[in-house]
């Protein structure tokens, strides 16, 4: 019947029925992920109605989806020529320019979209525009601007979970923010998104096989996945069953590896919280593990419903979730020394060694001798995201460069535009010229690794340390110097270096940080020995010992499961 209808419409020619059919079919292909087919149908629609701004906008979105960014930009610009008040076109163009590294233009587009959306009250588009603009400002190293923007949005919609999570993430990474204030903000999020929950029917058998659920939007080639893979690959399958709840859309080889390592896989990105709650309960999950905290794609509102009797947060976030019904936070004594318990809503469980275990992308690290031995000068480097760079940090790095004559600074993941201009101005103000700098935006993996071959010493940013970035630098043979901070966000380096035999590169003050980095830089022989030692010891360190790490983690799982069973009247073993 449908085929006959289509043929009849096509025979009638370029009338309104044919236009409607093209648009309907295009939307259907787009929803199914068949973007190339959608492109052709939107092109056909525009032949019939070339002055339709929304059709140009839709065409741009489908062109963007198949990687034709240049044509997508032209389509968005044509849409805005026809209708400057089309908020969706401004938003889409902003997102496209942000992805292409054109951050100043992206900011202009987002602000234009928000001016229109504030009046339209299209809630979903409004939330996305505020969220993306805030993330852009944060990425540029403008956290206070991002905080101001999020507070402006939350004045309109105080309970929006995504915008408030973004605010919490930015506050966690900022220098000189009062820790009590940050905790209060997290608790406020928790109060807003906690829900009454039904009792759990899980059999309280303390020694039975535990059913674990891991929840994340990062089950693809995201840095977090390289820490998740070991705990899936090395688990005791006789004692634990694993269900992965994927809240993302990207699929790649890492997704396939994680899926293969799990007993069951659930895609929950299209499920609302009530539906996901029902699914977790139906699966009989005993311990549900959050791997995101308040990072992008989190499902903390789902945890607010308490779909499992025990809930744990782990790995993905450098702070508390703020949820009273999140029972535990897994950490270690380096990142969270005894005495830090009051900073968290959750009860603290400490791993015996490192909080992290890392699965390298290759089994054997490439050879990487100290570049200073060939260059004759030392190259310090940072491979961390631009939002972790701040003026106080750059001033300290400038002191290191002054202390090591002819040394250079290599900065990767620093996009062109406002973020780079700000760092250049800070360094210039400290007397460091561009002739001593090498700067790059985000690099593909092979170029990222190649940049490490030009780095002698990596400098860990503060107060927000590197995590997976530090692991990768160490695996590629580049020693990292870190400053021990007061909270988790500034103590990741302490944990990582302590667990790979480089405690001598941990500084207790900025003065010591300069002395450690400059001292290593001025002694090429010692630098070469440290790099050789790192290459020899890292493979057998706790950081790469997947079996021991997973066994320690599962010991924690068993202990908290026994505790829950005991609370249900089941004697603890």
Image: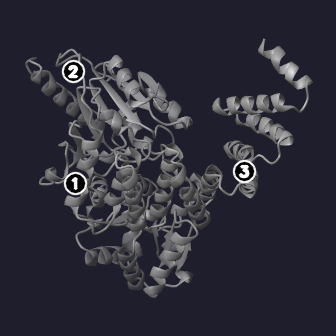
Q: CA distance from mark 2 to mark 1?
A: 28 Å
Q: Secondary structure at mark 2?
A: loop
Please, which colouring scheme is shown? one colour
> At 70% from the left edge and 30% from the top edge, which residue is drawn?
29
Q: Which mark is residue 199?
A: 2
Q: Earlier in the sequence, mark 2 or mark 3?
A: 3
Residue 129, image x, y percentages: 52, 53
Q: Above or below — where is 12 with respect to 364?
A: above
Q: Which residue is nearer to you in this view: 177 or 508?
A: 177
Residue 290, image x, y percentages: 33, 37
Judge the density around disc 1: few (<14), some (14-19), many (≥20) Cα neighbours within 10 Å. Answer: few
Q: Earlier in the sequence, mark 1 or mark 3?
A: 3
Q: Which mark is residue 464?
A: none
> Which quadrant of the rendered structure holds the N terminus?
top right
Q: CA distance from mark 1 to mark 3?
A: 43 Å
Judge the density around disc 2: few (<14), some (14-19), many (≥20) Cα neighbours within 10 Å. Answer: few
Q: Furthest residue to the front?
A: 119
Q: Are marks 1 and 3 in contact (CB under 8 Å)?
A: no
Residue 562, image x, y percentages: 15, 25
Q: Which mark is residue 184?
A: 1
User: To which residue does mark 3 refer?
Assistant: 72
> Which quadrant of the rendered structure holds the C terminus?
top left
């Amino acid at each position: 019947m449908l085929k006959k209808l289509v043929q009849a419409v096509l025979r009638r020619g370029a009338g309104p029925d044919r236009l409607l059919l093209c648009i309907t079919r295009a939307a259907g292909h787009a929803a199914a992920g068949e973007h190339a087919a959608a492109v052709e149908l939107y092109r056909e629609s525009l032949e019939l109605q070339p002055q339709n701004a929304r059709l140009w906008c839709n065409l741009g979105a489908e062109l963007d989806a198949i990687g034709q960014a240049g044509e997508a930009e032209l389509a968005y610009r044509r849409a805005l020529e026809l209708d400057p008040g089309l908020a969706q076109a401004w938003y889409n163009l902003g997102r496209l320019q942000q992805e292409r590294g054109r951050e100043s233009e992206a900011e202009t587009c987002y602000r234009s979209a928000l001016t229109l959306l504030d009046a339209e009250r299209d809630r979903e588009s409004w939330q996305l525009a505020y969220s993306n603009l805030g993330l852009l400002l944060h990425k540029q190293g403008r956290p206070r601007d991002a905080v101001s923007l999020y507070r402006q949005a939350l004045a309109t919609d105080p309970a929006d979970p995504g915008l408030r999570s973004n605010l919490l993430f930015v506050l966690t990474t900022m220098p000189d923010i009062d820790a009590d204030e940050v905790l209060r903000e997290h608790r406020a999020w928790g109060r807003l998104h906690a829900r009454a929950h039904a009792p759990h029917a899980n059999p309280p058998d303390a020694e039975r096989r535990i059913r674990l659920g891991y929840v994340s939007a990062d089950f693809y080639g995201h840095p977090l996945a390289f820490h998740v893979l070991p705990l899936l690959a090395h688990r005791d399958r006789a004692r634990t069953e694993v269900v992965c709840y994927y809240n993302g859309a990207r699929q790649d080889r890492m997704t396939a590896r994680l899926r293969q390592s799990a007993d069951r896989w659930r895609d929950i990105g299209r499920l609302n919280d009530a539906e996901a709650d029902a699914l977790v309960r139906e699966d009989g999950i005993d311990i549900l593990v959050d791997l995101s905290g308040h990072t992008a794609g989190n499902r903390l509102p789902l945890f607010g419903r308490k779909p499992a009797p025990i809930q744990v947060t782990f790995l993905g976030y450098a702070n508390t979730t703020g949820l009273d019904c999140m029972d535990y936070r897994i950490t270690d004594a380096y990142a969270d020394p005894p005495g830090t318990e009051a900073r968290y809503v959750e009860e603290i469980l400490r791993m015996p060694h490192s909080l992290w275990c890392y699965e390298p992308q290759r089994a054997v690290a490439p050879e990487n001798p100290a570049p200073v031995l060939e260059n004759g000068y030392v190259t310090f480097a940072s491979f961390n995201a631009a939002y972790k760079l701040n003026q106080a940090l750059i001033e300290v790095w400038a002191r290191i460069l002054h202390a090591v004559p002819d040394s250079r600074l290599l900065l990767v993941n620093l996009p062109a535009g406002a973020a780079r201009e700000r760092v250049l101005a800070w360094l210039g103000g400290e007397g460091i010229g561009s002739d001593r700098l090498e700067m790059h935006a985000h690099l593909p993996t092979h170029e990222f690794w190649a940049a490490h071959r030009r780095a002698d010493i990596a400098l860990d940013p503060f107060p927000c340390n590197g995590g997976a970035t530090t692991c990768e630098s160490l695996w590629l043979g580049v020693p990292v110097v870190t400053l021990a901070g007061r909270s988790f966000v500034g103590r990741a380096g302490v944990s990582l270096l302590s667990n790979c035999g480089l405690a001598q590169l941990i500084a207790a003050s900025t003065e010591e940080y300069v002395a450690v980095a400059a001292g290593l830089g001025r002694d090429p022989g010692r630098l070469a020995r440290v790099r050789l030692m790192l290459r020899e010891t890292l493979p057998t360190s706790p950081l790469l010992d997947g079996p021991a790490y997973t066994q320690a983690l599962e010991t924690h799982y068993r202990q908290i499961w026994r505790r829950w069973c005991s609370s249900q009247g089941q004697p603890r073993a």
